[in-house]
Amino acid sequence: MVFGHLLAVPGAHTQIQGGATPGTKAPAQAVRFADALLQKMTLEEKIGQMSQIAMNTADGATIDDAIRRGKVGSVLFVTDAAKINRLQRIAVEQTRLHIPLIVGFDVIHGFRTIYPIPLAMAASWDPALATNAQHMAAREATSVGIRWTFAPMVDIARDPRWGRIMEGAGEDPYLGSRMAEAQVRGFQGTDLGNADSLLACVKHFAGYGAALGGRDYDSANISDDQLWNVYLPPFHAAVDAGAGSLMTAYMDLNSVPATGNTFLLRDVLRDRWHFQGFVVSDWESIKSLTTHGFSADAHDAAVRAANAGVDMEMTSHTYRDELQAAVQRGEVKLSTIDEAVRDILVAKYRLGLFEHPYVDETLAASELLSPAQHSAARAAAVRTAVLLRNEGNLLPLRKQPSSIAVLGPLADAKADTLGSWSLASHPADTVTVLEGIRSQFAQSKVSYSTGVEIERGQPSIFDGQFPSPKPVLKTDAERKAEFDRAVDLVRNADVAVLVLGEAQTMSGERASRMSLKLPGQQQELLEAAVATGKPVVLVLINGRPLDIVWASQHVPAVLEVWYPGTEGGHAVADLLAGTANPGGKLPVTWPRDVGQIPLYYADNLTQIPEATATRYWDGSSAPLYPFGFGLSYSTFKLDNLQTSSPVLRGERGLRVSVDVQNTSEVAGDEVVQLYTHQRAGSASRPVRELKGFRRVHLEPHETQTVTLTLKPDDLSFWSPAKHLRVTEPGTFDLWVGESSQATLHTTFSLEGAAR
Ligand code: NOJ
């Protein structure tokens, strides 16, 4: 086990990495090996390495033949060890140069054992947890021969209508950067050559989360300020952490498609950040350059993608069909092809694929769903839950209630408990909330009804692979009878737990929404349950903030568990019973109404700042719950904020300390958050920016002093006035607290010349 070592990342929470990129430096030996191999390769073989095919779209015979003829460098969507070995044997034993394939898959939040979705992982505010979970996922995926994951997804998302908000770390570039680098470390381990290391692929470069109107694939128009200060930092952090590959995005960034974007792929990625891995397109996104009205035809698309710096084409075959002619005509230089292939071969070499191309086919049996996987998934699901409301301390349910009514379309829905991108999971492995409650509250009488059913109403791209259960109630009379039965169960129980939210296919790719309401009749069910007068706990399973204004006023306890994964039901039951204590915090601002979007905490101060909650005359413009918010069964008090000096100068930095006291009888976790604001400079700066955090565990009545260190680099930003990165001297506000509305305040000044 290697992750004990990986977890020790001193200072990682409080430092932005500088320009040095130690992890990305390709070892000289790997480069020499790749160069020697390049000498022997024909142009056709080189282009083969730049081509990836999907196993779920082409027929087996065609793929075998293409591999045999050296036309394939990578395959994706094959998850069975024997099948992977069979394909690998063709590549290694039947091709002229014996170059192994690199097998890729979307290992996003687990492989066979599913962990909470990435947005949930960010809600843990615990990068070490993300490292551990992705290491566990890597163990499972590599046990079947997969050595490349298309993760982490590090797109900043400030629009919950966008379905893919669930795949990233939310709205904040600082939290997003820490989660990005943590995941890279988890996937890639201490050495890519370890048999259980997966090559990470940071995606989608860049700006995909800013899709207009939250509509998946729509264009993103992002100012330079927002691009450099908000959208790019998590990519930079992942590159600095050594991410071995990067995926382009589907959309236009400021009218230039990301997959043909020389500025992004050469100027930023290679020249400024010194990225040394390889770049893969998104699915058919090279072919789509023509659809965008960017390239004239497939030939032009291949030429422009290759010249922009896309090294491998995912699933479309413009490279295979067009690049040879393009090189012969001088439209793409041979040196460009060589650079692309070198980076791909270096990755294969570093993964040890030339020496050990095959996987031990007996490995998966002991790794998949192992006890260690189950317990890590359960711990992760506990640690990612966010308690949004707990009036009268309804939670935890103090004793074994004599009866519990468990209601809702997600209470016993296995696939829906997993969330999107769980493609290698088996829903049957999942513990639902109902099952978790039944086993945790064994002395209680547990009754159950779906109450209402929910349906997406439109097909999902994942329907074929992973269908959600279809509604079984066919007539209005049947639906009414089930609804009434559910409400009766509440009347006859001590307490009701309603498990509501969104089904698996309601969030993820091509799963954007124009409303944030609870789908279907779930709101009505909730209101009817509350109207019985019985205590109601709302457990939310979902991948984005939803409209829960009514619940925030009328439902005593609201527990956000996101899509909690294979062990989700056990984890929820642990939290309800109080054998575990929620400690997560929101990684996104939670709006009241879809009309407020985009709504994020780090906006700029503008006219009449004291009235930011009254920007609309027809409702509040304040969030329902702020970024960084989350309750606990414990209570905490933060005080004694101190800085090591009134002045921040030099690399030793400013040490900021605060005392955190658990003022309750219950052990629990608090997340100490540090925010700053630059009062004046070459450009307006956000009202607050997260610059450090730490999640700490405190026993009853324990006090700990938490110290976070601020460095000058943490305060640097890309100035839209100066068109460069600056660190500007002057006065800064500093707050420390439990959310983005932290109140402990001081100031300090930053000394030194402006850069
Ligand atoms: C398209 C998605 O945008 C991307 O995130 C994913 O990795 C690929 N498909 C492969 O499944």
Image (spheres, helix red, strand yellow):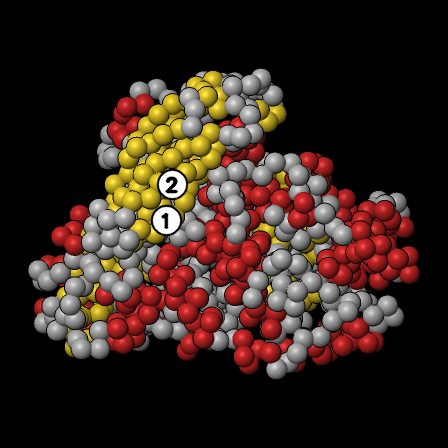
The reply, left or right, for residue 247 in relation to residue 654 is right
Q: CA distance from mark 1 to mark 2?
A: 8 Å
| Mark seen at residue 513 | none
Image position of 209 (left or right of 341): left
Residue beneath disc 1: 696
Instruction: Name the quarter where the C terminus is drawn.
Output: top right
Q: Quadrant of residue 441?
A: bottom left
* Pick the front one: 163 or 702: 702
Can residue 124 be seen by looking at this rendering? yes
- Image point 55% across, 70% down: which residue? 140
Whole-percent x, y for residue 173 in the image: 49, 40
- What is the secondary structure assignment of the residue under circle 1? strand
**Quadrant of the snapshot with the N terminus:** bottom right
| Structural crowding at the residue carrying mark 2, measured as other residues with C-alpha within 10 Å and reported as few (<14), some (14–19) or many (≥20) | some
Left/right of residue 647 with respect to residue 389 in the rendered view: right
Q: Which residue is mark 2?
A: 706
From the top left corner, tell me how far across and down residue 73 is, in percent. Answer: 75, 63
- Earlier in the chain: of badge 1 and badge 2, it is 1
Residue 90 image position (x, y, % from top left): 78, 76
Q: Amino acid at mark 1?
A: Val
User: SS class of the residue under badge 2?
Assistant: strand
- Side of 113 relative to 185 (left or right): left
Q: Quadrant of residue 523?
A: bottom left
| Amino acid beneath label 2 | Val
Q: Are marks 1 and 2 in contact (CB under 8 Å)?
A: yes
- What residue sits 71% from the left and 75% below the top? 358
- With respect to residue 372, does 48 lie above or below? above
What residue is shown at x 82% (from left), y 47% (from top)? 336
